[in-house]
Amino acid sequence: MPAYNEAEGIGDVVRGFLAHPMVAEVLVADNGSTDGTPDLAERAGARVVHETNRGYGFASRRALLEAREPWVIITESDKTFDPQDVTKFAAYHGQFDVVFGTRTSKSLIWSGANMGWFLRYGNWAVAKYLEYLHNGPCLTDVGCTYRMLSREVIRDLAQFWRVGDSSFSPELMVLAIRRGWRCVEIPVNYGSRVGTSKITGSRARAFKLGCRMIWLVLRLRFRRVPKASAA
Ligand SMILES: Nc1nc2c(ncn2[C@@H]2O[C@H](COP(=O)(O)OP(=O)(O)OP(=O)(O)O)[C@@H](O)[C@H]2O)c(=O)[nH]1
Ligand SMILES: [Mg+2]
């Protein structure tokens, strides 16, 4: 998981994921935190790596590339996601190469979660746009950062990664689809955050990010991304 100044939640998140019987290792890619996040993560049992390029994308890319297990789950360090959902992701292992989470299933949006109508319909609309432009599977969320990928897929997609900011989330979706990997989306629980929001906490910031994502998804439509031979 990427982490930037998440001291409030990181310890619980690391312990929560390590307690899941299917999790072998928790890796935290610290992104220059100044609040003691890496020490807290290490004390909770995580392996910590330091990414100096600031941005959700750079931190996530580093986390994915450093993972050593054959199946890798990427998540957030702010307590919004439920470690128990690892079981749901794992159920698709073998049938799909990439499993995206979606936070837009109403009954799994818990009280206090930052998923009001604006973010919910916004994510849904951009996801549909991505789905149709890139001929993807049914998609309902472009900003859900709880996902499972095989290490083979990570190695394959890494050669195409260009984005270092928060638009990395849809970039990864488009690349996985266009390389021909078997992708599916499943509903995940989404709860309230602890600590300070870095991205979608304000509606104006969320709107700007949405516009950047729309532009990126369109640009990627014109980029040559051949199917992977192993896919
Ligand atoms: N924005 C941002 N997030 C980073 C960075 N490096 C690591 N992260 C982590 O990436 C995750 C996403 O950031 P969040 O602030 O949770 O953004 P969000 O999930 O869109 O919004 P909320 O959870 O609703 O606040 C968090 O776990 C951050 O700690 C960075 O440079 N920028
Ligand atoms: Mg978050």
Image (cartoon, grey):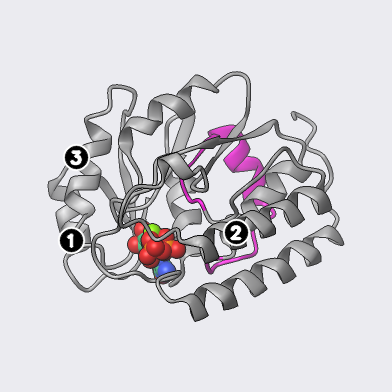
Front one among 160 and 112: 112
Report, in whole angstroms, how far the alpha carbon at label 2 lies from the one at label 1.
29 Å
Q: Which residue is mark 1?
A: 8
- Quadrant assignment for ligand 1: bottom left
Q: Which residue is mark 3?
A: 15
Report, in whole angstroms, how far the alpha carbon at label 3 lies from the one at label 1.
13 Å
Label located before the other in sequence (3 or 1): 1
- Which percent across, then down, holds residue 171? 65, 57
Label located before the other in sequence (2 or 1): 1
Which range of residues does the magenta coloring cover?
144-166
Q: Which mark is residue 121?
A: 2
Element class at badge 3: helix
- Dividing the picture into quadrants, the one containing residue 126 is bottom right
Work out whether 176 lies above or below 182: below
Q: Residue at x 76, y 42 (%)?
A: 136
Label located before the other in sequence (3 or 2): 3
- Which percent across, then down, holds residue 84? 32, 31
